[in-house]
Amino acid sequence: MTTSIADLRKSYERAELNEDASHAAPLQQFDQWLKEAIASEVPEPNAMTVATVGSDLRPSTRVVLIKGYDERGIVWFTNYDSRKGRQIAGNPYVALQFHWVELERVVRIEGIVEKVSDAESDEYFASRPLDSRIGAWASPQSQVISGRSVLVANAAKYGAQFMLKPPRPPHWGGYRLKPDQWEFWQGRKSRLHDRLRYRMEGDAWVRERLAP
């Protein structure tokens, strides 16, 4: 028996999100939810979708891993020459999304992206496993290649060239998104979900409820 996709249903009843119990600052609310996701051992709690828009106005998404966050913004690392890197260079407005399915929670973050400092990129690159550092050299990310053999050959080439101390490639480093809008979504029964949006107004965050 085949189940129709349109007939798939789930009742969201794990938790609630209200103005009184939430933090006044979105970063603190995010910090709480991310730590709860990690403590709950959900699969890859640090995975987030990054949405960018190209010069052709076509949006694209991919999943990356958050590597840091503080008052300055949300940080991840990647190849600057990748599709997302080229799109960010042309349009720095980016959206992020975390989806912790088991906790029935979504966090959406929007803002402007800039590159982190060379020192920050160098420090993180040096902390990566050797295979990952070689991989940053070996993969011409988002470019068409003839087969996997290209990657294997490149990895062997750069492994022999750099041995145990590959430097950070000039085309690889970090991005930081400075949020100007956050939304926290908590699934609720009868599709009456909780949605709290934080938006920057002047120098202060304004918290407001959105209809689900």
Image (cartoon, rainbow, N blue to C red):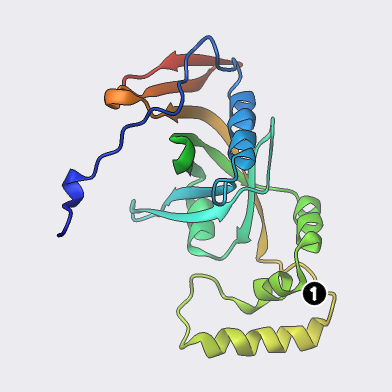
- Image position of 5 (left or right of 34): left
Residue 25, how many percent across, how many down?
61, 19
Q: Residue furthest top?
A: 20
- Image position of 172 (left or right of 4): right
Q: Of 205 and 108, which appears nearest the observer?
A: 108
Residue 156, how many percent across, how many down?
70, 88
Looking at the image, residue 139 lies above or below residue 97: below
The residue that appears at 64% across and 79% down in the rendered structure is 138
Q: Of 22 and 148, which appears nearest the observer?
A: 22
Instruction: State which quarter of the image contains the C terminus.
Output: top left
The residue that appears at 57% across and 51% down in the rendered structure is 44
Instruction: Give the image quarter of residue 141.
Output: bottom right
Q: Secondary structure at mark 1?
A: loop
Q: Which residue is mark 1?
A: 166
Looking at the image, residue 174 lies above or below residue 208: below
- Image position of 171 (left or right of 43): right
Task: Give, as a three-letter code, the residue at label 1.
Answer: Pro
The residue that appears at 46% across and 34% down in the rendered structure is 105
- Image position of 74 (left or right of 141): right
Instruction: State which quarter of the image contains the N terminus.
Output: bottom left
Residue 83, how many percent across, how many down?
48, 62
Looking at the image, residue 149 lies above or below residue 166: below
Count neighbours of disc 1 (C-alpha within 10 A) and say few if under 14, some if 14 to 19, many if 20 or more: some
The residue that appears at 32% across and 19% down in the rendered structure is 211
